[in-house]
Amino acid sequence: MLPWRTFSCGVLAALAFTTGSLSAQDAAAPAAPAPAAAPAEPAAPTLEQRILDLEKYVTNGQAGKDGDVTWKSNIAGPGPGHNAWQMTSTALVLFMTLPGLFLFYGGLVRRKNVLSVIAQCMGIAGLVTILWWACGYSLSFGAGNAFIGDFAYKFLDGVSPYASGAGYYWISDAMWCMFQLTFAIITPALIIGAIAERMKFISVLLFVGIWMFVVYFPFAHMVWSTTGFMCGPLNPDAGIKAIDFAGGTVVHMTSGWSALVLCLLLGKRKGYGKDSMAPHSMVLCAIGTGMLWVGWYGFNAGSALGADGIAANAFMTTTLAAATAGFVWAVLEWVLRGKPSVLGFCSGIVAGLVVITPGAGFVTATSSVIIGALAGVVPFLAVAYLKKILGYDDALDTFGVHGVGGTLGAILTGVFADEKANSIIAGLKEGLVMNQFKAVALTIVWSVVATLVITIVVKLIVGLRPTEEVESTGLDLAEHGESGYEH
């Protein structure tokens, strides 16, 4: 035993003697042998093993295990520090949607449609939460098969706030479930940026309801479940051994590519290319951007599932990439258009956050700066030039930032993933770039085909667009009976 561990044993033993907390177990007689047919119960932990459990807590490792030796740990539930970070991260990710995203998007639309964006975000938050409780969590993280889960956790049966291990060693199963819920909320909410100002509220809700079952739940399962088809870190039998730390494919690619298809099928806004459709409040947009940036620490650093070194690395890389991308985007505008706009800063920051997301916990600081620089260039080109060349009306640049940025991030994660940042990369590095390309291809094809079918179904059931009169008046008054501002 190392000297420092001997000292620790002595200190804890003295405390145990004083409080009596260890004496009952230490003095207890050995349990009677189990019947021959039953597997042997793990032994009660020794004092050294109990101290090792505490060390595992500090390093965010598995309690009750040291190599091939296992014991029945006295720590039955979540660890307070790691669980507290998970609670904080969950609140931060929800903060990204309400109010971060609806202020970011709300500032970018015309004043007559600002409440429609807020209502869509709030409506999606409510709808997705109900679906998640009913069966969405189970379909995402139940064992199921390689492509979809099962109904083992329907109505959150068996999801206990007092148990841990469903998500990671030291976080409550309930918090893991709620953390993942916030991802499920923001993903479809991103789509509304592409179709802002021209899709009926009922159509948005019906589209999202179907889309969650056809796209989101399967991808959350494939990428993050232990039985998932694309979960390289956790499933040794994965068909595609890809990596996605916090949602490059699951969140940004699915929403971004779906947004492109939906806006193409929906058609352009009335007066697009003729009438002014400038953002009505860059102040709201900038405030929303700041909220998204802050909330993104829950998104990325929270995906470490504990307050450990990987979380710290994700926090660092997220900051570096976002700041770099915002600066590069604005400088490109300055060079090419003569002025660095606030919208350019905002768009660049969000693009940097998007592109670093799949690699936040897998890449080093220098790599994140390179990723941030590319995030400031490639999505900028998509937003400034590709949209004009192809002529689609992606109202708030969901595809240009999330679709293109998410795709770029997934590929760059394969290029820059480094075991110095995360030791799990050591076993996945071989063939990783090709696996990332396969994951990207599957995500694009699945999202595009599924959205095409869902959009046709929604159009047949309730239609997609309001009347031209409603669109001219604005969705706020026509659909919600309210106005965001006094006229």
Image (cartoon, rainbow, N blue to C red):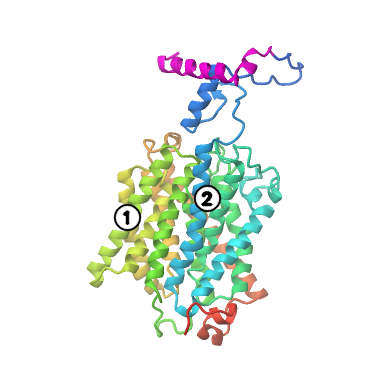
Residue 273 vertical placement versus 89 (above, below) = below
Tell me the residue that label 1 is attached to. Answer: 323
Asked if the stretch drawn in magenta spans residue 14, the answer is: yes
Q: Residue at x 28, y 59 (%)?
A: 327
Residue 28 vertical placement versus 471 (above, below) = above
Q: Secondary structure at mark 1?
A: helix
Task: Give x and y (percent) for residue 387.
Answer: 39, 71
Per the rendered image, the range of residues in magenta is 1-30
User: Could one spot residue 242 in this view of the protein?
Assistant: no
Tell me the residue that label 2 is attached to. Answer: 90
Asked if the stretch drawn in magenta spans residue 88, the answer is: no
Quick check: 137 left or right of 417?
right
Q: Amino acid at mark 2?
A: Thr
Is the stretch drawn in magenta largely helix, strand or loop? helix
Tags 1 and 2 touching, CB below 8 Å = no
User: Could one spot residue 164 in this view of the protein?
Assistant: yes
Q: Amino acid at mark 1?
A: Ala
Task: Give x and y (percent) for residue 337.
Answer: 25, 72
Task: Give x and y (percent) for residue 214.
Answer: 62, 59
Quarter holding residue 274: bottom left
Task: Give x and y (percent) for residue 404.
Answer: 42, 60
